[in-house]
Image (cartoon, grey):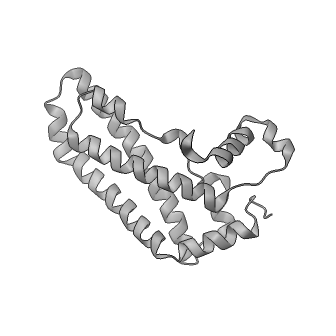
């Protein structure tokens, strides 16, 4: 077990992943989604929001902020792994808690449909949600933290144990 809770088996898996074609495709997909979303929110989305009712416009503002937050977390995770790939950061540092995915950032599609938001925003949200779910699983697989039993008595330790046992199906 390393200083940051990442053992050597996890390190080998992460090292292989950052050099893989899967990482390259995931990185490109994530950065393209960030760019597409930024372009939409600054252009077509801004225009579409002007024609929404007051309640829908407020929902649009909230949904776009949550989407942006989720995409920034995705981009951050991808950029950290790219730094590992390029030798700018070590795996032990990349495995630290501050770089982990916050599973509480997932967006719900039903909330967006109920608010009558533009279809393009819903589509971008769906794409971000799917990518976020995949990255969350990868993050857990690559940087799972095996902790001693005493640390599993806190809420975070119990949550890690549940996520490890049941995956993201909870």
Foreground residue among 85 and 164:
164
Across and down, in percent, residue 99 comes to: 60, 55
Question: How many numbered marks does the figure carry?
Answer: 0
Say which residue appears at 69% left-offset and 45% top-offset.
160
Foreground residue among 66 and 8:
8
Say if 146 sits above or below 11 in the image.
above
Say which residue appears at 25% left-offset and 21% top-offset.
55
Residue 157 visible, this orientation = yes
Residue 62 visible, this orientation = no
Across and down, in percent, residue 84 comes to: 58, 72
Q: Which part of the image, by quadrant, shows the N terminus?
A: bottom right
Q: Which part of the image, by quadrant, shows the C terminus?
A: top right
Q: Quadrant of residue 90?
A: bottom right
Say which residue appears at 60% left-offset and 53% top-offset.
100
Say if 87 sits above or below 64 in the image.
below
Across and down, in percent, residue 26 comes to: 43, 65
- Is 67 positioned to the left or the right of 92 in the image? left
Q: Quadrant of residue 119?
A: top left
- Is 161 positioned to the left or the right of 86 in the image? right
Say if 149 sits above or below 141 in the image.
above
Foreground residue among 156 and 96:
156
Across and down, in percent, residue 57 comes to: 24, 28
Say if 111 sits above or below 75 in the image.
above
Foreground residue among 93 and 168:
168
Say which residue appears at 34% left-offset and 35% top-offset.
63
- Is 118 positioned to the left or the right of 105 in the image? left
């Amino acid at each position: 077990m390393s200083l940051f809770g990442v053992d050597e088996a996890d390190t080998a898996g992460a090292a292989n992943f950052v050099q893989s074609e899967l990482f390259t495709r995931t990185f490109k997909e994530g950065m393209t989604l960030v760019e597409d979303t930024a372009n939409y929110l600054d252009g077509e989305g801004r225009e579409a929001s002007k024609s929404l009712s007051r309640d829908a416009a407020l929902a649009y503002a909230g949904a776009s902020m949550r989407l942006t937050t989720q995409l920034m977390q995705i981009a951050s995770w991808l950029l950290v792994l790219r730094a590992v790939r390029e030798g700018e950061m070590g795996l032990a540092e990349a495995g630290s808690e501050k770089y982990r995915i916050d599973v509480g950032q997932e967006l719900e599609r039903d909330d967006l449909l109920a608010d009558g938001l533009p279809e393009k925003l819903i589509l971008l949200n769906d794409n971000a949600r799917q990518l976020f779910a995949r990255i969350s699983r990868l993050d857990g697989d690559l940087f799972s933290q095996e902790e001693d039993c005493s640390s599993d008595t806190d809420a975070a330790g119990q949550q890690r144990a549940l996520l490890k046992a049941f995956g993201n199906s909870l």
